[in-house]
Amino acid sequence: MKILITGGAGFIGSAVIRVAISRNHQVVNVDSLTYAACLDNLVSVESKENYFFENVDICNQKELNRIFSLYEPDAVMHLAAESHVDRSIENPRHFIETNIVGTFNMLECARNYWTYNGMPNNFRFHHISTDEVFGSLPSEKSVKFHEKTSYDPRSPYSASKASSDHLVRAWKETYNLPTLITNCSNNYGPYHFPEKLIPVVILNALAGEPIPIYGNGENIRDWLFVEDHADALLLVLEKGIVGESYNIGGENECTNINLVNMICEILDKKRPKSAGSYGDQIVFVEDRPGHDLRYAIDPSKIYNELGWRPSTSLKEGLSHTVQWYLDNESWWRPLLDRNGIGSRLGLNL
């Protein structure tokens, strides 16, 4: 299969590409190389004959049309997005332009290409989204997001992703474009860009800097190892039912404070400090505006219909992730100089 993947130089996109290439798919990576992109994520595949790269912004419809015409993909996996909630609070315009207008451009270019080629039955447009579109859950463990949960976005980021989800559904209903949507829980793992919680904790700990936790640290997230997610995304592309959406969760709920303590305990074992524990560096800081209390996904649909479940426990995944950061300073060190990294964003309201 020849797959056009947008945002392939990002965290999740590069994981999908590495898995897809390993399974002998042809991949066209379309990425505008924003601050959060890193082509070093793809060093292991960049010389492969079945890998192609186009440095193109999804807001450039003319260039997208050229790419569709040149490569003639069998499927699209649309991952390109602005994704950091704090940045969306600071400057929501970029999120509207990329996540909404960019998705519109992708849908239109895909629709034109699909129509011109006789509307082939095997074509797929897979839109990758987030569980944040559903809003916030109460703390009760019995309540989880499912595919019919009403949308209730609370941040500019989640609102922009909710908008893009609705566009994808509209293009299926109005134009019959064969689409799929997946909504995932929080990803983590190797190559995670160092503005997100887990790499921030690891790198601040190693640098001897304060480890910030928003509010009281009781916010709960469902953590999904990125390679498990990549496997699920390709499975949905290949076997998912057109027009359906699938929630992909890690089945690893954890409060932020417990998560941070787990990381500190792993670091204490793998790279002990000369005195004390990394946990001594934890500080509580002003909470994020509109901070959702809890996310948790009910993955029963993707399990019952496609047979997928996550294979990586949170303890196992965190240990692997911490070790990867310890072993790959040459990857993360240059990224710390990029715009906004290491600064608290989202409080200038």
Image (cartoon, helix red, strand yellow):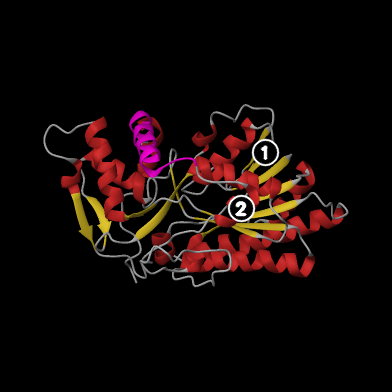
Q: Is residue 297 magenta?
A: no
What amino acid is at disc 1?
Val
User: Residue 280, percent across and down?
Assistant: 15, 46
Residue 79 in view here: no
Magenta-colored span: 311-328
Q: Quadrant of the C terminus?
A: bottom left
Main SS, magenta region, reads helix
User: Residue 329, percent across and down?
Assistant: 35, 32
In the image shown, does 230 or 41 lie closer to the viewer?
Answer: 230
Question: Viewed as shown, does residue 85 lie left or right of 304?
Answer: left
Which residue corresponds to the image point at 51% horizontal and 66% vertical from the top-left? 133
Residue 27 numbered tag:
1
Q: Is residue 293 above or below residue 264?
A: below
Residue 123 in view here: yes
Q: Is residue 321 magenta?
A: yes
The furthest residue to the right: 118
Q: Mark 2 points at which residue?
A: 304
Mark 2 neighbour density, 10 Å: few (under 14) some (14–19) many (20 or more): few
Mark 1 neighbour density, 10 Å: few (under 14) some (14–19) many (20 or more): many
User: What's the distance in space between the residues labelled 2 and 1, CA to CA?
Assistant: 29 Å
Question: Viewed as shown, does residue 62 lie left or right of 213?
Answer: right
In the image shown, does 322 or 346 lie closer to the viewer?
Answer: 322
